[in-house]
Image (spheres, rainbow, N blue to C red):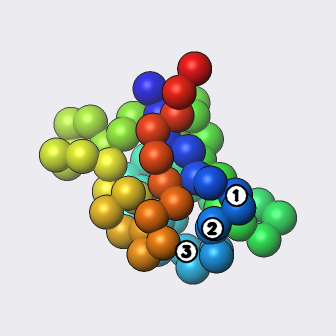
Amino acid sequence: MAMKIDKDTCVACGECEAVCPNGAISPAKGIYKIDPEKCTECEGVADGPQCMDACPDGCIDYLTA
């Protein structure tokens, strides 16, 4: 699975990009996006997705099919 950023609530603060151990988060058109091919939900690195913990606006959630 992977994480996703709600484009309607992202304020492009960059906090999520700074904590991503896989380089899966990057700026795109005034917001940030998560590459699902690179996102591992921080498995093996942390107890949970670091981007979710870092996001001050709570706009990051699990990507559903």
The quadrant of the rendering that contains the C terminus is top right
How many numbered callouts? Answer: 3
Q: CA distance from mark 3 to mark 2?
A: 10 Å
Position of residue 58 measured from the top left corner of the image (x, y, whole percent)? 45, 64
Q: Which mark is residue 7?
A: 1
Q: Of tags 1 and 3, which is closer to the observer?
A: 1
**Disc 3 target residue:** 14
- Relative placement, left or right, of 61 versus 4 is left
Looking at the image, do the residues carrying marks 1 and 3 touch, with CB atoms under 8 Å apart? no
Name above or below for residue 18 compared with residue 38: below
Residue ID at (38%, 57%): 52
Q: Position of residue 47 (x, y in %)?
A: 16, 46
8 w.r.t. 12: above or below: above
Q: Nearer the viewer, mark 3 or mark 2?
A: 2
Asked if labels 2 and 1 touch by Cβ distance under 8 angstroms, the answer is yes
Whether residue 55 is situated above or below residue 59 in the rendered picture? below
Circle 1: is it few (<14), some (14-19), or many (20+) Cα within 10 Å?
Answer: some
Q: Viewed as shown, does residue 46 lie left or right of 36?
A: left
Q: Residues within 10 Å of mark 2 (few under 14, many from 20)?
A: some
Q: Nearer the viewer, residue 42 or 54?
A: 54
> At x 78% / y 71%, what residue is drawn?
30
Up/down of 47 relative to 55, above or below: above
Determine the CA span between mark 1 and mark 3.
13 Å
Q: Which mark is residue 51?
A: none
Mark 3 residue element? loop
Check disc 2 and report the residue beneath it.
10
Q: In the rendered structure, which amino acid carries the disc numbered 3? A: Gly
